[in-house]
Amino acid sequence: MSGVGKGVTTASICAILKARGLRVTAVKIDPYVNVDPGTMNPVEHGEVFVTADGQESDQDLGNYERFLDTDLGRANYMTTGSVYLSVIQRERAMGYAGKTVEVVPHIPLEVISRITAAADAANADVTMIEVGGTVGEYQNILFLEACRMMRLERPRDVAVILVSYLPVPGTLGEMKTKPTQYACRSLNSVGLQPDMIICRSTHLLDESRKKKLSANCNVSSEDVVSAPDAATIYNVPLRLHAERVGDRLCGKLGIRAPRERMREWNHLIERLGRSTQRPVKIGIVGKYFSTGDFTLSDAYLSVIEAVKHAAWSIGRRPEIAWLNSEAYERSPALMRKELASLDGVIIPGGFGARGIEGKIGAIRFAREKNIPFLGICYGLQLAVIEYARHVLGHERAHTTEVAPKTPHPIIHLMNEQEERMKNSDYGGTMRLGDYPCVLAPRSVAQRLYGGVALIRERHRHRFEVNPAYSDELERSGLRISGRSPDGSLAEMIELPKHPFFIASQFHPEFTSRPFRPNPLFLGFVRAAAKRH
């Protein structure tokens, strides 16, 4: 089921196999008809993760990159929509030489060709493929058919892992295996037999249930793996390592490789353990938290992980507060009370008018009260709007995304985006992926990045700071500390006299890793820890 941990399991097995010295890559398959998640509301799908080559993808790509400590790209992601689109475009171009194009076998064959291309591009010994969704549903059956065809053709090259949830109903207090038995039978019904079952639950799996699943699912009891809830996802590679998942998989695939040495992961968990006593309180002011009566943190997953990486690296325990910008519009008193109790404030990326004035109010409070502040993408744009309104005196300053007729378009549409917007060309057309940024000499930004003059970070936006206001902003004390190489685009801003006030047009969270925190997050959390 969604959220059970397929992505973290995939990423963890990648980490285990990499620790054996193998070349490993990963592919995520999403079963929806959208070509990519770029046009989807974050509440629908969660975070849109952007790769270095500009692919808008599922948040699991972020976990793969963080656990493998490598960059992935377009080859590592596909959806039902993108697969069908490729097949249809090929048919229109006579790529099938006039043959009848059918759902089977041509769709599964396209899936297989994409998996093969990803493996070849990475020169991989092992390619982990995560099929999204729930086994037995209509949406992903063609991807399972691709797996069946691959396994039929090359049985020693393909292993199948079922990740399944074992509930412990509160009224019973007993772990139930029947849902997993039915999941296995659903997999059998499409011609696949799992080689291994990863058993997710709130509790450890005991031996009697391992044996029951072994007998009913036709899987060796050694291949029924206990995967209880962990304090952090970074514990999972060590947990699966202890269950000898690497040994078992290598045996099934006929791979000879040294037993993994998880030294780096052990050091990370030790560092986490030393960080439990000293908190640092970070508030994330957003609007994509609510899903019915529940809180959805997935919309800002990479931001959360980047905060954790930075906090752990300096021996601090991150305490993250979800702050609703719409509530701040209704109650400025609530905003002042909540923000005053924090050590640092983040305004993450986003789109649209909803909650925007609450975010601007939070930025002003952080600026005036000397609370460490980090703005990301929309956070930079709103920080410039706030500064123009309350320092430059342009009370009606705004972004043309929200107020097209504002007399002070401090933020406006990028030139190359205008024609696309006229044609309603929204999918995959933003400024996406890796771009260079020139850092201003002796700026805070340059110091945070180790004194280098040029960095590369990942973008996802259509609007930018209007260069017509750049000189006025800088004369008043707001420094544009990062620009595009041609000087036309403002990529970073800062207030040099503030304890920490920096914003970036790019998304630094996408390049943060548990072993290498992103420099902006590291600087921000250090400043927040100092305030605490």
Image (cartoon, grey):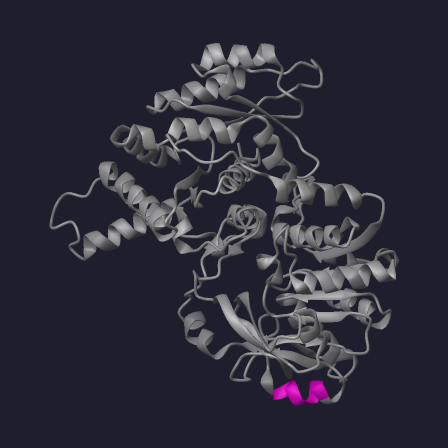
Q: Residue at x 43, y 52 (%)?
A: 36
Is residue 473 located in the magenta-colored stretch of the structure? yes
Is residue 269 located in the magenta-colored stretch of the structure? no
Q: Give the x, y percent position of residue 511.
A: 58, 59
Tell me if residue 406 can be seen. Answer: no
Left or right: 64, with 363 as reference point: left
State the extent of the magenta-drawn residues as a range. 468-474
Q: Main secondary structure of the magenta part?
A: helix
Left or right: 276, with 517 as reference point: right
Compared with residue 395, is residue 532 higher up or lower down, i.e. above or below? above
Q: Give the x, y percent position of residue 86.
A: 29, 52
Q: Residue furthest front?
A: 258
Q: Residue furthest left?
A: 98
Q: Based on the displayed image, in which of its 4 quarters is residue 266 positioned?
A: top right
Q: Residue at x 61, y 34 (%)?
A: 238
Q: Give the x, y percent position of residue 472.
A: 69, 89
Tell me if residue 378 can be seen. Answer: yes
